[in-house]
Structures are given as C-alpha cells and as structure tokens.
Image (tube, rainbow, N blue to C red):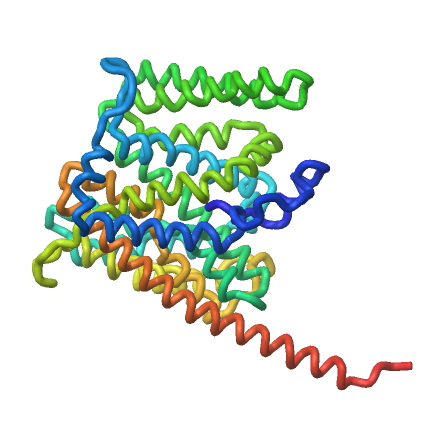
Amino acid sequence: MPGSLVGEVAATLADDSYGRTRMSLLRSARFPAIVLLVAAAAGLVVANSPAGGPVDDFLHTYVGIDGIFELTVDHWIADGLLAIFFFVVAVELQYELTSGQLNSARKAMQPAIAAAGGVLVPIAIYLVFAFGSDAADGWPIPTATDIAFALGVLAVFGKGLPAALRVFLLALAILDDIVGIVFIAVLFTTDVDFGMLGLALVTLVLFGILSRQLDSRAKVPIAIVLVILAILTWAFVYQSGVHATIAGVVLGLAMAQRPALRVRHELEPWVNVIVLPLFAFNAALVAVPAVSLGELSPAFWGVLVALPVGKILGITVFGWISLRIGDRSAAPPLKLGDLLAAGALGGIGFTVSLLLSELAFGDQPEIRDQAILGVLAGSVISLIAAGILVSWRAWHYRKQAAIAAAGTTSTPTAS
C-alpha cells in the first residue's frame, strides 16, 4: 500500500524535515506498480530458465543461528521482510481509522458494503470451481486488493477523476487489507504457543508506551530500544505459531501516530524498491506446468476468474446497493461507471493474494504454483480492464469539466 496516504497525512507531517519532496520517484504511485510487475515477470522468466534450479536452491538455503533461530532465505523474505510491508500497511490503517476516511461508521458505510461484495462474490466464484477438490482451501486468495497497483493505475490513467472516487478506492482497499490480515491471523495459525504470544504482548505494550516518548530529548536511545523491541516482538510472534507478518500489523497499530507516520515515510522507498519486489520475484518463481488447459488445477481457474470477474461484480453490485441505503448525504456521488472502474482496480490482487496462495497451499506445491499463476494472470486481466475503465471515466469527467468551463465563460456576468 505504499504511496496511498492522502493529503491529510502530508499535512500531518508538514514541518522543516518533511515539507520537502525527497526521493519522489521511489515514493510515486506509479513506481511500486511498475517495479512489482517487472519483478514478478522476472521471477517467472527465471523459474522457467536454466537458472531456475540454482536460484530455487539458494532460496531454500537456511540462514540464522544453528539450533536457535534459522529460516530459509525465502522464509526470511515472506516472514521477515514482508512484516515491514505490513507495518507500513498498519500505520496507514491506524491513520484512516482514527483521523482519515474510515474514522466513523457514517464515512465507512459505502466502501464497507462494497468491500463485503468484493470479498463474498470472489469467494463464491472460486468455490464454484474448487468446491470438493484439494484446491478448496484456497478460497481466501481472490479476496485481496493490491493498493500499490491500484493507485499506480489511477496515477497513469486517472487524470481528471473526482476525489470521491480516489477516496472510495482507498477506503475499499484498506478494508480489503483488514480482511486479508484477519484471514492470515485466523486461518493460518496453528499450534499456538501462548507463552511466546504472551512475551510478544509484553514487548508490544512496551513498544507502544515507549513510542509515545519519542518527542523527548533522548530520541536516538529510545529509537534504538524501539527497534530492539520490534525485533523481539516479531521473533516471539514467529515462535508462537502465528504468522510473523502479523507482528508488523500489531506494531504499526500500537505505535504513536505521529512517529509512526514519520517511520512509514522513511520506510516507504525501501518497501517499494526492496521488500515488495523481492517478495514478488520470490512468489512468482514458479515453473509453468506443461499440461493441457483441462489438466490445470481448479485453484488456477478459480483465482483466474474470481479476481477480475468476482471483484467487478461484487464491488459494483454491492456498491450500487450501498448508494441506495442509509444516509445518502454521507456517500460520495459515485456513478455506476465509477463502481465498475473501482471493481476492476479491486481485482488486482497481487501482493496479499500471492501471500495467501503460499499460506493456503504451503504443503501442496503443485497446487500452490498454479494458484500463484492464477493470481498473476487474473491480476494482469484486472490491470488491463482497470486501465480501460479508469481511462474511460477520466475522459468522461474531463469532458464534463470542459463543458462546464465553456458554459461558465459563455455566460455574461452581472454588472
């Protein structure tokens, strides 16, 4: 979700240090989407080349302290580095839930109803393909939205779109992230070690309390202790049996808002240029199966259809319903075409969908690889559809603005 905070965050950070534009390319909406796409394509190419074997062997090399704490390289990427991404996500969630677009039920109602459709309909479509098969456990995969890609498409094709549509999409993607985080925490947690979870809670509480002292003069010592507490929290969560990325989520939610926004600001370029591309490359490192279309797993077909079709149908239909219930004055003035564009953007699952594929089929590598191919193909279809629909809506609103401007200039002013 890097790059998606709206103007209020910039205002929150406005001071001598953060009023300047630094590393603008790495923080732009376009950059993460392009790099993610290139990294995923590179992973597919490498996996299906002679280099695929050696790279895969390297990623399964164990790194750490023998007998104490060691993970394979790909687990360090998925469980370690990706926790930093989830920290950035959680900081944004905290901001939006307390000060932004989701800080009241009135504001959240329309995107929440649309997000529900964007979760339920893809699940239903996936299960049409996979119910009763070994692939049925992958039903959470098509529920996610990759906000980095969605905002990248808006930045490239959305010139002239109303602010209401951008706000709606941001809120929708944030709610999707919450659903994805809940799925990761609840569905993929096994054999919980409550002792380790208790230690994680202790370090988390200390982290939250100490983060509220960062405005004191001892900023550097406090920052060092916070880093140590964050690492300990991550290690305890990992050892507890809960997926380690959840540590990033709870740390981002627990940290005091202003320093959390500053840390997010500093981490954003590194997440964009290192964390997400490495994860995308690693996740997409799958060999394309040499089988006929009829032999492909229901996981592939389910994700392939559920991401573009399910998201468009779910978000559009439920979003349309949300416009007609409740307090209409609270809802942004979105049209059916706007909801179609938002639905297509919602179908770009990518990062969280790739992670859910890894988690759902961790012990079934053949099904996992086909689910990942389904995520990549479904996301690309949604990307193309979103580019077309967003361009159409942007053209529509630019045309309306031009007509309105022409009408204003042609109307004589009263003397």
Residue 394 % position (x, y) = 53, 70
Residue 312 image offset from top left, x and y in percent: 36, 63
Q: Which of 323 and 27 lies nearest the eye of the viewer?
A: 27
User: In the rendering, at what x and y percent does residue 402 appear?
Assistant: 64, 78
Which quadrant of the view contains residue 237? top left
- At which x and y percent is residue 36? 38, 50
* Residue at (28, 31) in percent of width and height: 73
Q: Left or right of 148: which side holds 243?
A: left
Establish if 34 lies above or below 191. below
Q: Which of 411 and 232 is in front in this view?
A: 232
Q: Nearer the viewer, residue 76 or 360?
A: 76
| Residue in view at x 19 percent, y 55 percent | 300
At 16% from the left edge and 48% from the top edge, which residue is drawn?
A: 50
Q: Is residue 199 visible?
A: yes
Q: In which quarter of the image is the C terminus?
A: bottom right
Residue 69 lies in quadrant: top left
